[in-house]
Image (cartoon, grey):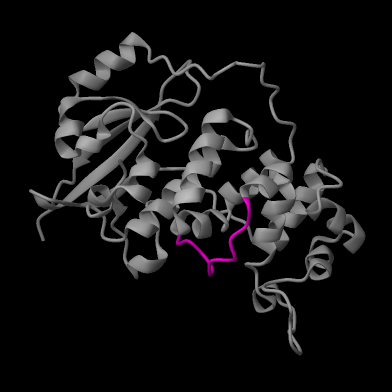
Amino acid sequence: MHVMEVQPGSASDRGLSGPPLRGALPNTGGLAKERANPLGSYLRARRERVTPEQAGIAASGARRVPGLRREELAMLAGISADYYLRLERGRDRHPSGQVLDALAGALRLDADEAAHLHVLASQPVARRRGASRDTAVPPSATDLLHSLPHPAFIEDRYLTVIDANEHAVALDPRLAPGRNQLRDLILDADERAMYPDADLAAACLIASLRHSIGNDLADPRFVQLTDELHDASETFRRTWSRHDVRAQRGATLRLIHPVDGELHLNREQLAINATAGLKLVVYSPVRMTAP
């Protein structure tokens, strides 16, 4: 479970952590096409979200495409339009770091987005047939989890709860082991009711999922989860097509609890050593300072 970050400004344009989510939602794209050409899909999605005005290009006449044209992005990045077309269409999947940095600058990507661009252009780690990632929790981490006086749980890179202490389950019964936080936030009405803006909270989790998966788009559990949500939810389809990516960070959060009302919590997460992306997430009360 993740809860909304308390930030100044409109709740409609901010996420769970980090800077505001940017731009309008583009048209829905298919998951199979993205998996076949992840770098090209990401480039196109980000290109469509940079306006000519943002890029310092004088826009004249009717434009048939949202955002920048391919040749405009190529010019801004200092590469040929033909080479950029090859990248976007998947004919060249591993450009140099210099080219990627130039594209990141032209696309106005932040640090997380630029890092993701480099990851998508790298070679995926070979996966042995039948191999799965180790999700065994070290005994020391289990002992720590259940000794904490605050709600805490361990999540994997798919946002599935691996273990949770009694305080976490008391706060939200859907934090029981085996539950997936993104699936619940998209499909479970009781979970959605706990969020002031459930769609925005889901968008932040989707951005986090993209960050944790990187270019491992053939991961069977990732494929199963995204296929399920893509088939079941228009919200997921539209939000996934944004290609937002963001690492989760500590934040001050707000949760609307059905019994206790509005709660303000600090969320911190710690990577668990020697595991495949497991994290210990802890919620603690916000200390109120005197005026």
Task: Please name the residue shown 66% across and 79% down the image.
Answer: 53
* Magenta residue span: 18-30
Asked whether residue 150 is in view, the answer is no
Q: Is residue 175 left or right of residue 90?
A: left
Q: Is residue 46 left or right of residue 208?
A: right
Towards the viewer: 163 or 284:
163
Above or below for 102 versus 166: below
Quadrant holding the C terminus? bottom left
Q: Is residue 135 left or right of residue 127?
A: left
Task: Please name the residue shown 14% across and 34% down the image.
Answer: 170
Above or below for 289 versus 122: below
Q: Residue furthest top?
A: 139
Task: Please name the residue shown 67% across and 52% down the image.
Answer: 42
Task: Please name the residue shown 38% across and 43% down the image.
Answer: 183
Query: How many numbered marks are there?
Result: 0
Q: Residue furthest front?
A: 231
Towards the viewer: 71 or 18:
71
Q: Is residue 62 left or right of residue 78?
A: left
